[in-house]
Image (tube, rainbow, N blue to C red):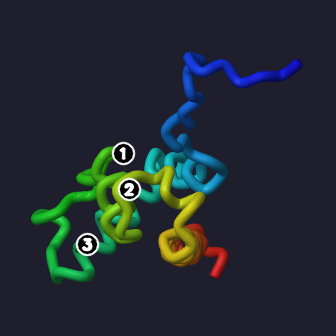
Amino acid sequence: MNESQPNAPTKVPSPSKGGAYARQAAMLCQDRAFQLYLDRRRRAKFGLGEAALPDGTHDTDDARDWLVAACQIQSRAELDSNAQARQTFRMIRNRFNHWRAKQEGHL
């Protein structure tokens, strides 16, 4: 017999952990090429020279902060449940991949 016990603890779902998109975003933020892309993107956007913002300025934490702000989320884990943020992430990743291909002479 499967009777519910009145004092049995209620199972509370664990906080959302990252799924496939969150993991992809984490790997992207750790990618030195992506960090370099952010350096160069910022220089171009604000008309800065390399002396003002040298290559290697962005690190993993900066990349994470930039990505969550760009996707308008609090955590990369939200990418797996927020369709709008996921679409923004895909666009960012595609633009980065296009930039990287140009840098490597594939385009």
* Label 1 SS: helix
For the residues marked 1 and 3, what is the alpha-carbon distance in whole angstroms?
A: 16 Å
Q: Does dot 3 land on a helix, a strand or a loop?
A: helix
- Dot 2: what SS? helix
Nearer the observer, disc 1 or disc 3?
1
x and y percentages locating residue 93 in the rendered image: 54, 69
Q: CA distance from mark 3 to mark 2?
A: 11 Å
| Relative depth, front residue between 73 and 99 | 73
Residue type marked 3: Arg
Amino acid type for the residue under numbered disc 1? Thr
User: Which marked residue is nearer to the observer: mark 2 or mark 1?
Assistant: 1
- Give the residue number, with chain letter if any, for mark 3: 42
> Can you tell which mark lies on residue 33?
none
Reading the chain from its start, which is encountered first: label 2 or label 1? 2
Could you say where residue 69 lies in the image, as x and y percent from the top left?
A: 31, 65
Q: Earlier in the sequence, mark 3 or mark 2?
A: 2
Image quadrant in which the C terminus is located: bottom right
Q: Which residue is mark 2?
A: 35
Residue at (28% x, 52% y) in the render? 62
Q: Are marks 2 and 1 in contact (CB under 8 Å)?
A: yes
Crowd band around label 2 with a 10 angstrom C-alpha radius: few (<14), some (14–19), many (20+) = many
Q: Position of residue 95 (x, y in %)?
A: 52, 77
Q: Is residue 27 above or below residue 74?
A: above
Q: Residues within 10 Å of mark 1 (few under 14, many from 20)?
A: some
- The image's mark for residue 60 is 1
Give the mark nearer the N terminus: 1 vs 3. 3
Amino acid type, label 2 = Gln
Residue 68 in which image quadrant: bottom left
